[in-house]
């Protein structure tokens, strides 16, 4: 991913936060004659690893074993996981200046690494449990999964778990930093007034961007 210096993450916490809030990633890997594979899958940082997401960190994920992508994956394969955060179209009418051009504000993290498939059912179950805990904490209501462990085990034969050893991370936070402060503030306010949660989230990130990144 091409990331101009102006749009780099203010610090590593921004990258970790985007992945935590937007864990449905697009996992891609090399394919065969038909081209690369790409699957939308939930991916979380290893809860037993470091909080920061960078080279040396570990991510955990799982997918349906019936997916041809699972059969094509080999331990040691390079993979790319793409996490997409808040984004919104910027119409030139917001700028209130001429000349102007439309653009798209967006946030994204690309994580490269090597994959290791987990054939052990207990390791797979551990990944599923860790994923449930992470999502219930962030998006759910604290659901107690203890009464569903038997059901989880029934599903295990169809679940393929894996870990990704992170080798590189690229983060892009394009939030109108190229504009003058007063124009950028008009964009933020326009997004904040929208009913769409995606626009409001983009506005929130614009407001939280440190002054040095504006």
Image: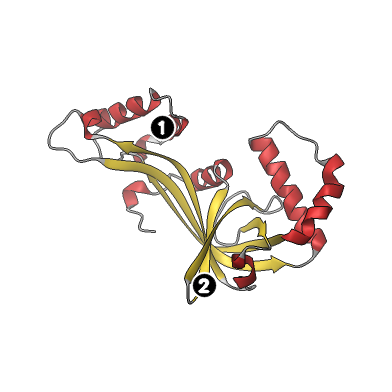
3D distance between C-alphas at marks 1 and 2: 35 Å
> Depth check: 212 or 33 in front?
33
> Depth check: 23 or 174 in front?
23
* Residue 104 image position (x, y, % from top left): 32, 42
In the figure, residue 69 lies in which quadrant?
Answer: bottom right
The residue under label 2 is: 31
Residue in view at x 41 percent, y 36 percent: 209
Task: Give SS at disc 1.
Answer: helix
The number of numbered discs placed on residues in the rendered structure image is: 2
Dot in front, 1 or 2: 2
Q: Quadrant of the N terminus?
A: bottom left
* Residue 148 image position (x, y, % from top left): 83, 43
Q: Quadrant of the C terminus?
A: top left
The residue under label 1 is: 199
Is disc 1 in contact with disc 2, using a CB cutoff of under 8 Å?
A: no
Outermost residue, left side: 99
Task: Give SS at disc 2.
Answer: strand
**Callout 1: few (<14), some (14-19), or many (20+) C-alpha neighbours within 10 Å?**
many
Q: Left of 105 or right of it: where is 42?
A: right
Mark 1 or 2 closer to N-term? 2
* Residue 180 image position (x, y, % from top left): 23, 34
* Residue 152 image position (x, y, % from top left): 80, 50
- Give the colouring mode of the picture: secondary structure
Q: Is residue 180 above or below residue 192?
A: below
């Amino acid at each position: 991913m091409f990331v101009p210096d102006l749009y780099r993450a203010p610090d590593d916490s921004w990258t970790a936060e985007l992945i935590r809030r937007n864990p449905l990633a697009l996992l891609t890997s090399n394919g065969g004659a038909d081209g690369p594979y790409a699957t939308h899958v939930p991916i979380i940082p290893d809860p037993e690893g470091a909080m920061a997401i960078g080279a040396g960190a570990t991510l955990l994920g799982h997918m349906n074993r019936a997916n041809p992508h699972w059969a094509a994956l080999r331990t040691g394969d390079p993979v790319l996981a793409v996490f997409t955060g808040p984004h919104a179209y910027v119409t030139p009418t917001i700028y209130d200046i001429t000349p102007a051009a439309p653009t798209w504000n967006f946030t994204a993290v690309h994580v490269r690494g090597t994959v290791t498939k987990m054939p052990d059912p207990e390791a797979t179950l551990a990944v599923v449990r860790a994923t449930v805990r992470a999502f219930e904490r962030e998006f759910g209501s604290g659901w107690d999964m203890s009464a569903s462990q038997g059901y989880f085990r029934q599903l295990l034969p169809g679940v393929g778990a894996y870990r990704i050893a992170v080798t590189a991370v690229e983060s892009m936070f394009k939030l109108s930093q190229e504009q003058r402060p007063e124009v950028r503030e008009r964009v933020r306010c326009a997004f904040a007034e929208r009913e769409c949660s995606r626009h409001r989230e983009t506005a929130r990130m614009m407001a939280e961007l440190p002054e040095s990144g504006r």
